Image (cartoon, helix red, strand yellow):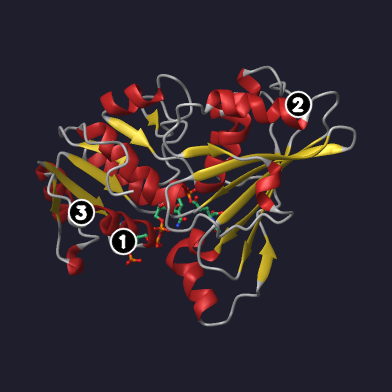
Amino acid sequence: MARVFIDGEAGTTGLQIRERLAGRSDIDLVRIDSAHRKDPEARRAAFAEADVAILCLPDAAAREAAAFAADLPVRIIDASSAHRVAEGWAYGFAELTADARARIAAAQRVSNPGCYATGAIALLAPLVAAGLIAPEEDLTINAVSGYSGGGKELIAEFKTGEAPDFFVYALGQSHKHLPEIVAHARLTGRPVFAPSVGRFAQGMVVQVPLHLHGRTVAGLTDALRAHYDAASFVRVRGAGDYAGRVVPTALNGSNFIDLSVHGDDARGGVLVAVLDNLGKGASGAAVQNLNLMIGADEGLGL
Ligand SMILES: NC(=O)C1=CN([C@@H]2O[C@H](COP(=O)(O)OP(=O)(O)OC[C@H]3O[C@@H](n4cnc5c(N)ncnc54)[C@H](OP(=O)(O)O)[C@@H]3O)[C@@H](O)[C@H]2O)C=CC1
Ligand SMILES: CC(=O)N[C@@H](CCC(=O)OP(=O)(O)O)C(=O)O
């Protein structure tokens, strides 16, 4: 039986992790009274009791939590962006490399990827590794997310009707997912990133438009297929599966991410990832990592 503490269990990501763990006989949830959820003493006691703590907190609180736990045996999965390129933390993307699963399973500290970063890295890393994208290539990433990606505050803005139906944001090129995209896709250049949010609760499309310069849609698709051949939750689709429309909500509620390459060999292409920002982009990935860490079936509860 693994004792698991979800720090921030009342938040968007925390609640979804709790739902995915509900009914598991191999997991015993360590909980603190919600009135004390931000009390450092109560949280420290929970860390001391748990085998694994999942941090579903803003970055500053996640850093504080990691410091509380520094001298405790508890293992940590951090859903925030505080430790995604930090020394000593395994990057929690099980399908990314041949040894990722084993590294996560053995790790004391695991950092869950960001939602946009999951899509971008899933597309770019295998193509860089295969030599089809040069590490220094000029890349752009466009993405749209459901509003739950912005946590409780953004959800409230959409629920009150205060938010517009669609907006593009973070155009100043300091989005918090860029460092992990560069590091884990093994780029030497920095992509230009333009994320956006629409009036739908969850779901996401990440696009990388590419001038093909001799590369082909089939060649890029085959390279992705070869990389994710044995992947549990990453699927490579053909452009024809989409009938001309890619829908961000298509995988809501699941832990899958679907990758595809669209375009025309003579005119240009677009790499596309579809995922649930709260599934493979957050809570689903956290549960997948937890399963690996405690030796459970990787897909249990997903
Ligand atoms: N939403 C998403 O799609 C994704 C989110 N993430 C990341 O996961 C983390 C959590 O995000 P999300 O669930 O969306 O955020 P929310 O704002 O929905 O939830 C955060 C929770 O943390 C609690 N909290 C804040 N400060 C503290 C503290 N000092 N001690 C204990 N609890 C605290 C909040 O309490 P209160 O209830 O009082 O507000 C809230 O319940 C973030 O780092 C986010 O970037 C990662 C991938 C995707
Ligand atoms: C729509 C929206 O606001 N999205 C968030 C990212 C959500 C996410 O992935 O958070 P982490 O970085 O903690 O993983 C943003 O752009 O900051």
In percent of width and height, residue 163 lies at: 60, 75
Left or right placement of residue 204 versus residue 192 in this view: left
The residue shown at (28%, 27%) is 105
Disc 3, SS? helix
Residue 137 has which mark? 2
Q: How many marks?
A: 3
Kind of residue sitting beneath label 3: Pro
The residue shown at (34%, 52%) is 56
The residue shown at (38%, 48%) is 284
Please tell me whether mark 3 or mark 1 is closer to you in this view. 1
Which of disc 2 and disc 1 is earlier in sequence? Answer: 1
- The answer to whether residue 44 is above or below residue 111 is below
- The answer to whether residue 207 is above or below residue 292 is below
In percent of width and height, residue 71 lies at: 17, 32
Q: Circle 1 sits on which residue?
A: 15
- The answer for how far apart the CA atoms under marks 1 and 2 are is 39 Å
Q: Circle 3 sits on which residue?
A: 40
How would you rate the neighbour count of disc 2 (Cα within 10 Å): few for under 14, some for 14-19, many for 20 or more?
some
In percent of width and height, residue 201 lies at: 51, 67
Residue 220 has which mark? none
- The answer for how far apart the CA atoms under marks 3 and 1 are is 20 Å
The residue shown at (72%, 21%) is 134
